[in-house]
């Protein structure tokens, strides 16, 4: 047994315990406690933020003003708890009851409680008893929680002394919480139970209790928009069995049920079929990986994956195990090592054996990290646990990679940031790019960048909320906010004013811009259901039971009538919630299957035909992507990983692209012919410094990358192999201290081009090769001149490009955006075509040119555009394409910034 012991009970799981996510919260696998959270309101500004959350822990038997197991953000107290004897020594004990349900014990040697107590293992917060009998808790982040002599929380203070102040009624119940700007959160009670919570906007949450005094309902404030009550008397409802919460019903009547066994959480089941719990379905039941020699093992299933948590004798997570995704593979074990005194993580080892290790200072700050390749990063901290410097294996002696300087008054204001600068390959002497921050009344006032330019001035309202930002030229964006910080009016430097309207639940309902009005509606759970903007209407439909998105439909207004432009539909595996099917606007059907027990993507099918099959190695790393072509052939991309000193690193070392035929080799293997290979080497910071490209088994070209001390690419060179006809280039870049590119010298196949740029005080491009560019007050480029050709660009009130036109062209290209900022339409006056775009969230999944939709098929990345397969490099560049029954062809050669070098 260790003394002092480590915390084990309720509340937020500690880092050494791990956590398993469930609806509304997490389960602590170390003890089976279910912890749920419900945030009602909050705001920020001067001083500590207010975040009012209700917490429930099913194993917490303490009764509070919310009932058994429930607590809230300001329900914290200190309580003297008698004595304990260890190894013949007597200790006085003090309990710290945390808002989230944690219970911590502090120990004082002897018979007197004075000064700082000894914390439990793994706890860095310091609790001290002051001379006047009060208690003070100092968090790792230096926030101070002040308790009176009776142990009641009185204030929460930041480093600058700004406080949240708690005021109590005569019966000891909390009356209000006031912030540093005099905004208040108010409370009332009934029969000893917390009854109402009122925030600074006057919104009221009402709590209801059952006959046993258990919280059974959180009634939301009336949903009001523009004076109209849209919903009333709605809320979250809770049901209990034997005093433990077993059901939650949301605002729309959807339910989640929880089950328990032997005092531990066992499972959940949602009304739409989503479920999870202890791994009864996994091979081997509750211990599918046959983990032996551990004090505790718990296996959980949810979301299509199964994971086992194994603990050592001190309750620390020792192994995280996942059953294999393929027959014959071992379980995947992620292992952890902990310090016995502090319970801090000393190392973490992935299933392959790749290990990351950590060293700490006496206050628990990480002072050294070593990655699996042996690369080290060292960090220095001040007495306030604020980061002071960073050094790595490539930092020159006597310098820091980063240096942070704080105010000398101990208030923790960051005043200077110094970043190592200079290009070693040019033999430049290392120097620093320094950014200076100036403060006023505890708020950031203005910033001077490394060029010495005052690039940002900030203004605030009476509550300490940001309301204006001015650049070095005086161009100012301003806004008006309400008492909770919701932006109600904004005016940009161009003079565009946008008005925002919200409902009483804080959801944006209308946005009035110079380009038109956008309106939004939501269901009671906050999911957006309609959006009407100047370009059309978008509707979202959700499953009534699960809440999963079923469809998104986009319509355009034509002669006063909405006409559907596109619709995307979705289907899911009900018990896991994994995406099963996406049906695109042209009725292309994309179906996804997943590996058992790991939940990894296994296949992507298009209209019943497999377009990609994913395979993973025994350690869970992507090993191969197969792209079938015809019945007996296809392309495969293999992923190989780097080893250093005979140890795995999990770093990608090689990509191999091969064509596979159905013909078997003499050994019974599918015959493969390599058509492309990329091999990578890395520098002392893990950055790619060389890529060797092979085509058809022979070296094709070598690309080398060079970086400066700020991590910016300063040189890239591509050298073809002997006798190979492909682009050869060398590109060098020069930057100023804030990262503006000053010059690019580009030599391609012996032809050299030099581009020189200058910048104004706001770091906007002033000239390119001596020719001026123009910007609007928002900083958007309005006139761009390149190679003697002038381009004119215009923008909407939200800085979206709405037109581009070449000066000598009779027409240009215009763009339309929806109310979420997605580009939904392009009118190309040059090519004389109109393009419509369809989305899944923010991802483009189809585009229509004329009457034909071009679908995008995604797996782990973009697999097909139309009927053309896409192959990608380590950097995300397109390296090859091929049709459904054609061999792959090289893609155009691009430089590191995506600029075309050769090809089309």
Image (cartoon, helix red, strand yellow):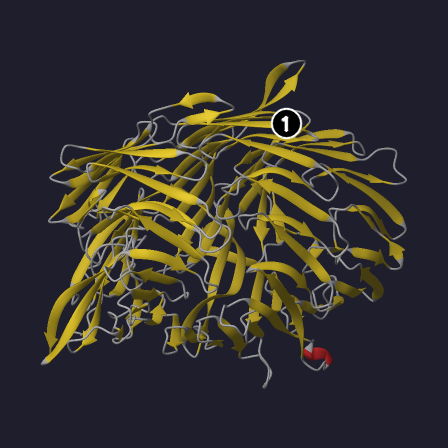
- Residue 274 at x, y percent in the picture: 30, 37
The residue wearing badge 1 is 517
In the depicted view, which residue is nearer to us: 559 or 230? 230
Whether residue 395 sits left or right of residue 860 in the image: it is right
From the viewer's perspective, tell me whether residue 756 is left or right of residue 19. Answer: right
Where residue 309 appears, x then y in whole percent? 24, 58
Q: Which residue is more in the foreground, 682 or 503?
A: 503
Q: On screen, 502 above or below 892?
A: above
Which residue is located at x 58 percent, y 86 percent?
397
Placement of 476 over or under 158, stated as above or below: above
Camera sees residue 805: yes
Classed neighbour count for the residue bearing mark 1: other residues with Cα under 10 Å, few (<14), some (14–19), many (≥20): some
**Which image quarter holds the N terminus?**
bottom left
Q: Residue at x 75, y 56 (%)?
A: 902
Depicted 250 relative to depicted 441: above or below: above
Q: Is 149 left, or right, of 812 in this rendering?
A: left
The reply, left or right, for residue 885 in relation to residue 223 is right
- Classify residue 623 by image quadrant: bottom left
Residue at 65%, 48% (x, y): give it.
468
| Image coords of residue 870 (percent x, y) | 58, 47
Q: Is residue 331 visible?
A: no
């Amino acid at each position: 047994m260790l003394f002092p012991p480590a915390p084990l009970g309720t509340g937020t799981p500690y880092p050494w315990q791990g956590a398993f996510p469930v609806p509304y919260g997490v389960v602590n696998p170390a003890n089976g406690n279910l912890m749920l959270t419900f945030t009602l309101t909050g705001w920020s500004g001067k001083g500590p933020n207010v975040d009012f959350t209700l917490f429930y822990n099913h194993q917490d038997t303490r009764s509070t003003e919310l009932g058994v197991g429930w607590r809230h953000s300001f329900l914290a107290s200190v309580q003297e708890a008698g004595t304990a004897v260890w190894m013949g020594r007597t200790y006085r004990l003090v309990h710290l009851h945390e808002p989230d349900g944690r219970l911590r014990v502090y120990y004082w040697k002897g018979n007197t409680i004075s000064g700082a107590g000894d914390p439990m293992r793994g706890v860095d917060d310091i609790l001290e008893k002051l001379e006047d009998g009060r208690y003070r808790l100092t968090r790792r982040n230096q926030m101070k929680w002040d308790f009176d002599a009776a142990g009641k929380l009185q204030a929460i203070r930041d480093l600058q002394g700004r406080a949240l102040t708690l005021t109590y009624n005569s019966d000891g119940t909390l009356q209000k919480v006031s912030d540093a700007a005099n905004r208040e959160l108010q409370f009332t009670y009934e029969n000893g139970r917390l009854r109402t919570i009122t925030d600074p906007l006057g919104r009221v949450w009402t709590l209801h209790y059952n006959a046993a005094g258990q919280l059974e309902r959180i009634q939301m404030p009336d949903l009001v928009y523009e004076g109209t009550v849209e919903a009333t008397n709605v809320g979250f409802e809770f049901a209990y069995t034997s005093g433990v919460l077993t059901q939650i019903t949301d605002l729309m009547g959807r339910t989640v049920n929880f089950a328990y066994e032997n005092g531990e959480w066992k499972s959940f089941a949602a009304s739409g079929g989503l479920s999870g719990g202890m791994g009864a379905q996994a091979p081997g039941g509750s211990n599918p990986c046959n983990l032996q020699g551990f004090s505790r093992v718990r296996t959980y299933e949810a979301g299509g994956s199964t994971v086992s948590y194994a603990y050592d004798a001190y309750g620390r997570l020792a192994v995280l195990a996942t059953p294999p995704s393929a027959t014959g593979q071992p379980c995947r074990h992620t292992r952890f090592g902990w310090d016995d005194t502090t319970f801090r993580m000393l190392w973490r080892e992935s299933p392959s054996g790749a290990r990351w290790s950590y060293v700490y200072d006496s206050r628990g700050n990480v002072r050294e990290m070593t990655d699996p390749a042996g690369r080290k990063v060292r960090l220095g901290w001040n007495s306030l646990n604020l980061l002071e410097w960073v050094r790595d294996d490539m930092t020159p002696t006597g310098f820091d990679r980063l240096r942070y300087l704080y105010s000398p008054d101990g208030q923790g204001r960051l005043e200077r940031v110094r970043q190592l600068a200079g290009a070693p390959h040019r033999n430049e002497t290392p120097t620093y790019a320094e950014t200076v921050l100036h403060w006023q009344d505890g708020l950031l006032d203005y910033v001077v960048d490394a060029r010495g330019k005052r690039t940002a001035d900030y203004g605030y309202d009476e509550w300490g909320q940001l309301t204006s930002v001015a650049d070095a030229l005086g161009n100012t964006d301003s806004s008006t906010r309400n008492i909770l910080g919701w932006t109600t009016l904004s005016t940009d430097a161009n003079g565009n004013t946008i008005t925002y309207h919200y409902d009483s639940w804080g959801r944006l309902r209308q946005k009035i811009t110079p380009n038109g009005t956008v309106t939004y509606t939501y269901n009671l759970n906050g999911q957006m259901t309609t959006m009407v903007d100047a370009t059309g209407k978008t509707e979202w439909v959700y499953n009534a039971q699960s809440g999963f998105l079923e469809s998104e439909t986009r319509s355009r207004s034509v002669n006063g009538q909405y006409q559907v432009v596109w619709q995307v539909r979705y289907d899911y595996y009900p018990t896991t919630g994994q995406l099963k099917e996406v049906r695109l606007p042209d009725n292309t059907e994309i179906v996804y299957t997943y590996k058992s027990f790991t939940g990894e993507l296994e296949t992507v099918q298009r209209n019943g035909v497999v377009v990609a099959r994913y395979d993973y190695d025994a350690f869970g790393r992507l090993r191969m992507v197969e792209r079938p072509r015809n019945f007996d052939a296809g392309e495969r991309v293999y992923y190989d990983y780097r080893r250093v000193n005979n140890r795995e690193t999990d770093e990608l070392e090689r990509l191999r692209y091969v064509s596979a035929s159905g013909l078997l080799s003499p050994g019974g293997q599918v015959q493969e012919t390599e058509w492309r290979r990329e091999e990578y080497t890395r520098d002392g910071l893990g950055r790619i410094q060389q890529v060797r490209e092979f085509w058809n088994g022979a070296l094709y070209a070598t690309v080398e990358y060079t970086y400066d001390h700020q991590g910016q690419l300063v040189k890239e060179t591509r050298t073809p192999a002997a006798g190979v006809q492909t682009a050869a280039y060398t590109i060098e870049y020069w930057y100023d201290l804030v990262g503006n590119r000053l010059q690019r010298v580009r030599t391609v196949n012996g032809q050299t081009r030099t581009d020189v740029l200058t910048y104004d005080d706001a770091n906007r491009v002033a000239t390119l090769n001596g020719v001026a560019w123009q910007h609007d007050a928002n900083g958007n480029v309005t006139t761009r001149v390149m190679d003697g050709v002038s381009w004119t660009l215009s923008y909407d009130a939200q800085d979206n490009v709405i037109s581009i036109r070449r000066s000598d062209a009779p027409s240009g290209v215009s763009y339309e955006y929806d109310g979420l900022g997605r580009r939904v339409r392009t009118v190309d006056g040059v090519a004389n075509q109109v393009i419509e775009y369809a989305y899944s969230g923010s991802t483009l999944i189809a585009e229509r040119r004329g009457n034909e939709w071009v679908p995008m098929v995604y797996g782990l990345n973009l697999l097909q555009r139309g009927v053309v397969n896409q192959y990608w490099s380590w950097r995300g560049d397109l390296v090859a394409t091929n049709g459904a029954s054609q061999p792959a062809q090289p893609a155009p050669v691009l430089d590191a910034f995506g600029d075309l070098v050769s090809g089309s």
